[in-house]
Amino acid sequence: MNESEQSLKLFVVLSRAYRAINDRMNKHITSFGLNPTEFGVLELLYHKGDQPLQQIGGKILLASGSITYVVDKLEQKGFLARKACDKDRRVTYAHITDEGKALIEDIFPSHQQKIDDIIGILSEEEKAQAIEMMKRIGFHAKDQK
């Protein structure tokens, strides 16, 4: 197998592995009555604190047009609230509510365990190597024109 064919094979294997892991995690998330995007927003707010609505999409890899819809749904469920910025009227923050915190605190340990169950097939050294390799590929892809 030549270098180009090897690159293509790696791409296919990475894509399939990502899809399998993502499908498994999405099934777990939906069992709690959330879709993966809602979970991503709540998890972001829980771990990083209040976030400007305009920046959430970039942080959880979601198109900015979808953020309003997701925030509206989470607000209706009582898991987050919009909060105006004191310094700039044009900026609105998403703030996780006590109900949202309680939900994430309930969900996240089993979410993390599910990930560990999947990724745990690798040794700590293999995980560290995989992290470094994926970072290199990701940074290189960003640098491509």
Image (cartoon, helix red, strand yellow):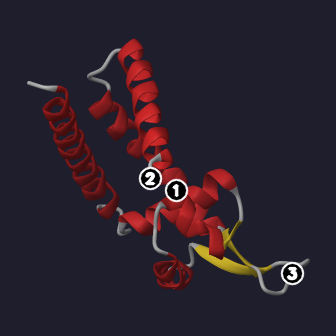
Q: How many labels does the image show?
A: 3
**Residue tagged by mark 1?**
104
Which element type, helix, strand or loop, lies under badge 3? loop
**Which residue is at the front of the view, 107 or 46?**
46
Give, as a three-letter code, the residue at label 1. Ile
Which mark, residue 88? 3
Q: Of label 1 and label 3, which has the lower sequence position?
A: 3
User: Which percent across, then down, holds residue 73?
Assistant: 48, 82
User: Which percent across, then down, holds residue 24?
Assistant: 23, 49
* Residue visible at 46% across and 74% down in the picture: 63
Q: In which quarter of the image is the N terminus?
A: top left
* Residue visible at 32% across and 25% down in the picture: 120
Question: Position of 135 compared to 18: left or right?
Answer: right
* Residue visible at 44% across and 48% down in the picture: 144
Which mark, residue 107? 2
Q: Of label 2 and label 3, which has the lower sequence position?
A: 3
Which element type, helix, strand or loop, lies under badge 2? helix
Question: Position of 18 compared to 58: left or right?
Answer: left
